[in-house]
Amino acid sequence: MDYIELVGYIASAFVLLSFVMKEMTKLRIVNIVGCAFFITYGILLFSWPIIITNTAIVFVNVFYLMKQRHQVIHNK
Protein backbone atom coordinates (compact mmCIF):
# COMPACT_ATOMS: atom_id res chain seq x y z
CA MET A 1 0.00 0.00 0.00
CA ASP A 2 1.43 3.37 -0.95
CA TYR A 3 0.98 6.60 0.99
CA ILE A 4 -1.65 7.95 -1.42
CA GLU A 5 -3.86 4.92 -0.84
CA LEU A 6 -3.30 5.28 2.92
CA VAL A 7 -4.59 8.87 2.80
CA GLY A 8 -7.72 7.59 1.03
CA TYR A 9 -8.29 4.94 3.69
CA ILE A 10 -7.83 7.48 6.49
CA ALA A 11 -10.30 9.81 4.78
CA SER A 12 -12.82 7.00 4.43
CA ALA A 13 -12.42 6.02 8.08
CA PHE A 14 -13.12 9.56 9.31
CA VAL A 15 -16.16 9.98 7.07
CA LEU A 16 -17.49 6.58 8.16
CA LEU A 17 -16.87 7.50 11.81
CA SER A 18 -18.85 10.71 11.35
CA PHE A 19 -21.91 8.66 10.39
CA VAL A 20 -22.02 6.95 13.79
CA MET A 21 -21.84 10.20 15.75
CA LYS A 22 -24.99 11.23 17.58
CA GLU A 23 -24.04 14.81 18.39
CA MET A 24 -24.21 17.05 15.30
CA THR A 25 -21.27 19.25 16.28
CA LYS A 26 -18.93 16.29 16.68
CA LEU A 27 -20.31 14.73 13.50
CA ARG A 28 -19.56 17.86 11.50
CA ILE A 29 -16.05 18.25 12.94
CA VAL A 30 -15.12 14.62 12.29
CA ASN A 31 -16.62 14.89 8.80
CA ILE A 32 -14.55 18.03 8.12
CA VAL A 33 -11.41 16.10 9.08
CA GLY A 34 -12.40 13.27 6.74
CA CYS A 35 -13.11 15.72 3.93
CA ALA A 36 -9.74 17.39 4.50
CA PHE A 37 -8.07 14.01 4.03
CA PHE A 38 -10.20 13.44 0.90
CA ILE A 39 -9.16 16.85 -0.45
CA THR A 40 -5.53 15.87 0.12
CA TYR A 41 -6.21 12.53 -1.54
CA GLY A 42 -7.81 14.29 -4.50
CA ILE A 43 -4.83 16.61 -4.84
CA LEU A 44 -2.43 13.67 -4.76
CA LEU A 45 -4.48 11.97 -7.50
CA PHE A 46 -5.07 15.20 -9.45
CA SER A 47 -8.80 14.43 -9.24
CA TRP A 48 -10.94 17.57 -9.44
CA PRO A 49 -14.25 15.79 -8.69
CA ILE A 50 -12.88 14.59 -5.33
CA ILE A 51 -11.40 18.00 -4.53
CA ILE A 52 -14.49 20.01 -5.50
CA THR A 53 -17.03 17.75 -3.80
CA ASN A 54 -15.20 17.52 -0.50
CA THR A 55 -14.38 21.24 -0.46
CA ALA A 56 -18.10 21.95 -0.90
CA ILE A 57 -18.95 19.56 1.95
CA VAL A 58 -16.43 21.34 4.21
CA PHE A 59 -18.10 24.68 3.42
CA VAL A 60 -21.55 23.25 4.19
CA ASN A 61 -20.33 21.82 7.51
CA VAL A 62 -18.60 25.08 8.47
CA PHE A 63 -21.72 27.06 7.53
CA TYR A 64 -23.94 24.97 9.82
CA LEU A 65 -21.38 25.01 12.65
CA MET A 66 -21.25 28.81 12.45
CA LYS A 67 -25.05 29.02 12.27
CA GLN A 68 -25.34 26.81 15.33
CA ARG A 69 -22.75 28.89 17.20
CA HIS A 70 -24.58 32.09 16.29
CA GLN A 71 -27.86 30.66 17.62
CA VAL A 72 -26.23 29.57 20.88
CA ILE A 73 -24.66 32.99 21.42
CA HIS A 74 -27.88 34.90 20.75
CA ASN A 75 -30.17 32.61 22.76
CA LYS A 76 -28.33 33.14 26.04
Image (spheres, rainbow, N blue to C red):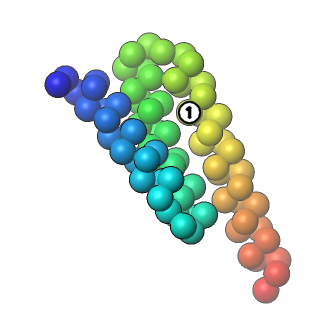
Percent across and percent down for residue 14 are: 40, 47
In the image, is 23 to the left or to the right of 73? left
Q: Nearer the viewer, residue 26 or 62?
A: 26
Q: Residue at x 60, y 42 (%)?
A: 58
Q: Quadrant of the C terminus?
A: bottom right
In the image, is 24 to the left or to the right of 68? left
Neighbour tally class for label 1: few under 14, some 14-19, many 20 plus, Cα within 10 Å = many
In the image, is 63 to the left or to the right of 51? right
Percent across and percent down for residue 31 are: 51, 49
Percent across and percent down for residue 41 are: 39, 27
Q: Residue furthest left?
A: 1
In the image, is 53 to the left or to the right of 9? right
Q: Nearer the viewer, residue 76 or 2?
A: 2
Q: Quadrant of the N terminus?
A: top left
**For residue 70, above or below residue 14:** below
Quadrant in the rendering for residue 49: top right
The residue identified by callout 1 is 54
Q: Residue at x 46, y 39 (%)?
A: 36
Q: Residue at x 35, y 31 (%)?
A: 8
The reply to whether residue 29 is visible in this rendering is no
